[in-house]
Image: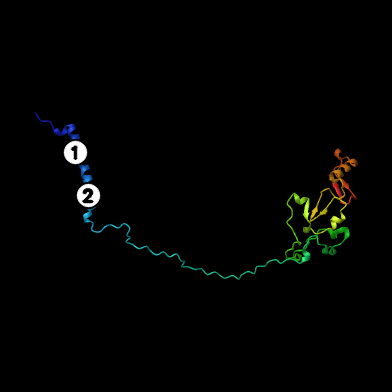
Amino acid sequence: MAKPNPLKHPLLKYFISILLVSLSYILGIYTSSNNSTSPPLQEQKQPLNCHQLNFSLPVLDFESHHTLSLPQEPLRNLQFFNFCPPNFTNYCPCHDPSREADFTAERFFSRERHCPEPYEKPMCLVPRPAGYKRPFSWPKSRDYAWFKNLPFKELSEVKKTQNWVRLEGDLLVFPGGGTSFRKGVKGYVDEIKRFVPLKSGSIRTVLDVGCGVLSLQF
């Protein structure tokens, strides 16, 4: 009777496999430890200097080594506007009294708006009146203006009996009640209603001819 083959036993196969894997693992650890192990301190003749550099840094050059020649342009002469003559303080380009004689007086065409031609425009800065102050901001500018900004008393003297403009100290005061409307605009409109039925809607516009200011009521 033949003897059974011991290699065919399953437990023996597992034991041999585990033995081979263990030997391979131990051999690998031993080989890697020999390659990575540093030499003993006795074999190091010179101490290591980690701060010592064995190379020199290159010298960096940041200077430009190229040029481009540009044509030199002549300096421009900057021109600044000069001040206009003193008589230009109240200059109104399109309403210049000195130009009225150049136009016909028929139908008061000379009083129309006549602006100067481009070649007639003065190239200068109009000077400010003496003592000029910054104007009032809205809505205060609706009722007040500095007299030195408009240094003319004629209108306030001619219309002093009318509620138009008054000179009070260094201020021109505009009451806002109209010219000949001593009771104000509201009183004037109420008087118009006495003669013209504005509420009916049949009359939309009333022209008060002869009032002195060409009153127009809507």
Q: Where is residue 68 in the image (x, y as percent from the top left)?
A: 51, 68
In front here: 54 or 52?
A: 52
Report the residue marked by disc 1.
Answer: 19
Q: Residue 70: x and y, percent?
A: 54, 69
Q: Is residue 155 left or right of residue 33?
A: right
SS type, badge 2? helix
Which three-letter amino acid code belongs to the residue tagged 1? Leu
Which residue appears at 87% of the width and 56% of the height? 158
**Mark number displayed over residue 134:** none
What's the residue at 21%, 43% (across, down)? 26
- The residue mark sitting in front, 2 or 1, is 2
Sequence-wise first label, 2 or 1:
1
Q: Residue lying farthest left? A: 1
Residue at the spot x=76%, y=51% of the render? 141
Judged from this view, the residue extending furthest toward the front is 169
Is 43 on the left or on the right of 139, as rendered? left
Left or right of 195? Residue 132 is left
In front of the other: 158 or 213: 158
Residue 123's spot in the image, x, y percent? 73, 65
Quadrant of the drawing holding the C terminus = top right
Q: In this view, does 134 lie to the left or right of 168?
A: left
The part of the image, by quadrant, that contains residue 1 is top left
Q: Name the residue under label 2.
A: 34
Q: Are marks 2 and 1 in contact (CB under 8 Å)?
A: no
Label 1 sits on a secondary structure element that is: helix
